[in-house]
Structure formats: C-alpha cells, structure tokens
Amino acid sequence: MVRVPKLTRAEVAQAARNPLLFIAERWTPSPRTVRRAAMSAVVMAVVIVVTGGAVRLTGSGLGCPTWPKCTDESLTATSAMGFHGAIEFGNRMLTYVLCAAVGWAIIAARSAKPWRRSVTRLGWAQFWVVMGNAVLGGIVVLVGLNPYTVAAHFLLSTALLTVAVVTWQRVREGDAEPRPLVGKAVSQLTWLLAVAAGLLIAVGTVVTGAGRHAGDSSDVHRIPLDWKMIAQLHADLAWVVVALTVALWFVLKAVDAPVGPRHRTRDLFLVLMAQGVIGYVQYFTDTPEILVGLHMLGSCLVWFAVVRVMLSLRERPGATAPVPAPAAETPEPAAAG
C-alpha cells in the first residue's frame, strides 16, 4: 500500500496558488512520457472531429436542444430523449476527455526538465482553442445548426489539430534556431501546397453545408449553393493538391533533399489517394453516412500529413551546452633533492 505523504499548510497554499509549479517540483516525466502526452492530444483532436461527425450524420445535432444544459430542466440527457440525445450528450462528454488529454500534455511539458516555456505555451494554446470551440459548439446548437457556424466549428477543430501536431513535433526536437533543410523555392512550393490544402478543407465545409446531411431530422437551413457545383470545385481543388504534392516530391528528389521531407511528402500522397477514393465513391453513391464519416476522418489525416510535411523542412537540434575550458595545469613541485 502506497503511503501518501502529508502536505504542510505552506505546501497546500503553494499547490493552490500554482498547481503546475507544485507538480513540476515533485515530478519529472521521461521524454517518452512527454511525447505520449503530446500525442494523446493529437489523437483526441481527431477523435472529437469524428464523433462530432457522427452526431451530425445520425441526425443527433439537436439531440440536446439547448446549451450548456442538455434541456432546460436537465444537465444530462434523459431516457425520454432516446438515441439522439445519448449521441449528442456523449459527444459533449468527450470534450472533457479532450480537455484531460490537453491538460496532461500541459502538465507533462511544464514538469519536464529542463522546462521549455515554448512547449508549455503551445499546450495552453490548445486549451484555449478547445474552450473557444466548446463555446462555438454551444452557439451551433442555439442557432439550430446554422451551416455557417457548423463550418466554423469544424475549421476551429482543424486549428486545434494544427497546434497539437506542432506541439508533438516540438517535444521531439530541441530549442535551437530552426535550420532549413531545403532551399527557399522548395519552401515556397510547400507553402503553396499548404494553402491549397487549407482551401480544399474550407471548401469541403461548404460542400457539407450545402449537402443533404443537415445534422437533424427537422428542417435545417442549408447553404444556398448548388451542391454538385461546389462538390466539383472541391474535387478540382483536390487534384490541385495532389499535383502540388507530386511536384514537391519530384523537386525534393531532384535537389537530393534529406529523407525526412521526401518520406513525409510520400505519406501525404498516399493519404490523398485514399481520401480521393472515398470522396468519389461517396459522391456517386449518394453520400452514405459511413463514407461521409470516413471522409471526415480522412480530412483530419490529410491536414495532419500536410503539417508534418511543413515541419519536416527544417530541423531544430538540441541546444548544446558550452564545453568548459580545461582547468589550467598546476606544475608539480620539484622533487626534494
């Protein structure tokens, strides 16, 4: 049986004033633990998108018709609300799991030795994005699943994934100044790829907002655009992203870039191919719910791969401590004769 040490009154006061510092002074996680904590936030950022998609695709978007309570009288879903209430309330509860994952990442980053303030700040950035998106999710319910707010909700989730991936990358590298691994022209091509991928995802939210999955069985307002036209634009942008990815891979081969950027670009291409297959199949099969859900997961994986390509173009080795100068040698005393 583990004996819990008693805290003095001063220690209790310190823990209340600055709990992160209190934990950091008493716990030093291994680098592996810090990496796992950062990765848990990445995983939950993807999971919350997929489960949010499940809420919409099952028509449970208004399963809890108000916010922050589930109903005007109950904080939680009731049995009378049935399947849709359970799905919507379950997704709300997953927000707490996401907060726990982000909180673990913050605690692990703050407790690591040496303390890296930049990594801790990235963890707090995730926290505030989660809080902002939780409020936006409540607004989505209060305005009856307005498609523009739904699109903003998804894009803010993509922003959370971006910060989570950057945090995961930063805990795996040092704090030295980033050193580019490729030339300026290659970096510019990669930025163009990232912008195109961002437009692809943004247009995808418009396709969703104009499509038939409104998120509820009642009459929900849709974006007044021709769905087939906007879906075609989405497909065209997808081919632009694929073309830029292939071009980037050939350029990286031509300039004999390090293996890291080439492998990350290859991974992006493979994810794009899988996502494209799902996209075309769902289009020609009248967007079945399961394929739409897989396409939302694919959107997260595409953006994850894009961010990894961006981050692979530079390296940040650990800062090396200066080597102390050797101590001056003292002459040996002469032997007494």
Image (spheres, grey):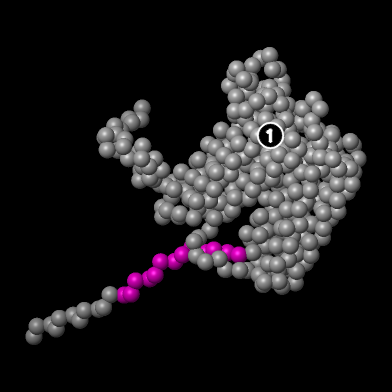
Query: For residue 14, what is the image quadrant?
Result: top left
Residue in the foreground of this view, choosing between 142 and 227 = 142
Q: Can residue 33 be seen in this view?
A: no
Q: What residue appears at the point 67 percent right and 30 percent down from the top-left corner?
A: 142
Answer few, some or many: residues within 10 Å of disc 1's Cα (few below 14, many 20 plus, some between 14 and 19): many
Percent of width and height locating residue 293: 76, 37
- 320 sits left or right of 270 in the view: left
Percent of width and height locating residue 311: 63, 59
| Tag 1: amino acid | Val
Residue range of the region highlighted in magenta in the rendering: 314-326
Residue in the foreground of this view, choosing between 233 and 244 = 233
Q: What residue appears at the point 72 percent right and 38 percent down from the top-left corner?
A: 150
Q: Can residue 299 be seen in this view?
A: yes
Which residue is the site of mark 1?
140
Q: What residue appears at the point 38 percent right and 71 percent down from the top-left corner?
A: 323
The C terminus lies in which quarter of the figure? bottom left
Q: In this view, does 61 lie above or below 280?
A: above
The N terminus lies in which quarter of the figure? top left
Name of the residue lying farthest toward the top: 80
* Helix, strand or loop status at disc 1: helix
Name of the residue lying farthest toward the left: 337
Query: For residue 46, what is the image quadrant?
Result: top right
Percent of width and height locating residue 75: 58, 21
Q: In this view, does 142 lie above or below 14?
A: above
- 141 sits left or right of 19 in the view: right
